Image: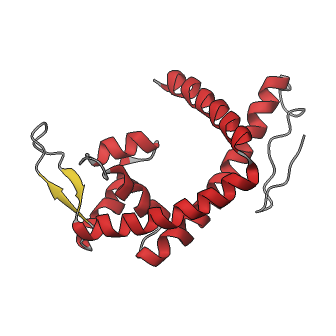
Amino acid sequence: MRETLVNGQQTVNPGSGAGSRTAAGDAISELVVLVFQLDGVLTTAGDELAKPAGQTSARWRVLASVEDAPATVSQIARAWGLARQSVQRVADALVREGWAAYQENPGHRRAQLLRLTTRGRRALRRIQEAQRSWADALGSEVGEADLRQASSVLARVLQVLRAEIS
C-alpha cells in the first residue's frame, strides 16, 4: 500500500525496510493517515464556522475549554493533546483582545486560570449556533449509526495510545 497524500508525500510502504507490518499494523496506519487528513479538513471547516465570530479553530477550542469552568493553560493543553506553549500563545492573544481573562488560581500560585469574558462567551455561542446546523447536516449525510461506530473505534484507539504514553 503506497498512498500519495495531497501535498505529494507518500505513506510508508509496508513492504519496504526491515519487514512488513501485520494486517492490523496496516489498518492502524491507514486510519492514522485518514485521521491526519480529517484533522486538516476539520480545521478548515472550523475556521469557516468561527470566522464570523472573529475566531479560528484554535481559538474556538480554547474558548470552549473554559466554557463551563476556568482552567489552566496546562489543563487545556492536556485535554486536547497539544503543546502547552501553543495553547499559551492562543490564550494570551484571547486575553489581549478581551475574549478571555486570567484570574488567580487558589490551587497554584503561578498557574493562572483562564476564563471567558462576556465578549468571549458571546463569540463562543455564535460559533456553537453555526456548528449545530453544520453538524446536523453532516451527521444526516453520513448517518448516525456509522458515526457512533467510528466514534467508538476512535475512542478505543485513543484509550490505548494514552495508556502507552503514560
Name above or below for residue 164 compared with residue 101: above
Name above or below for residue 23 compared with residue 127: above
From this viewpoint, is residue 69 visible?
yes
Tell me how the rendering is colored: secondary structure
Number of numbered discs visible in the structure rendering: 0
* Residue found 32% across the figure and 69% down from its top: 122
* Residue found 27% across the figure and 74% down from its top: 97
* Residue found 38% across the figure and 45% down from its top: 77
From this viewpoint, is residue 93 visible?
no
Task: Say left or right for 52 vs 105.
Answer: right
Instruction: State which quarter of the image contains the C terminus.
Output: top left
Locate residue 38, reporting x and y percent. 67, 53
Locate residue 29, reporting x and y percent. 75, 36
Instruction: State which quarter of the image contains the N terminus.
Output: top right
Residue 4 or 156: which is nearer the viewer? 156
Q: Examine the image and state in which quarter residue 93 appears.
A: bottom left
Residue 22 or 69: which is nearer the viewer? 69
Locate residue 112, reporting x and y percent. 17, 49
Locate residue 127, reporting x and y percent. 45, 66
* Residue found 62% across the figure and 29% down from its top: 157
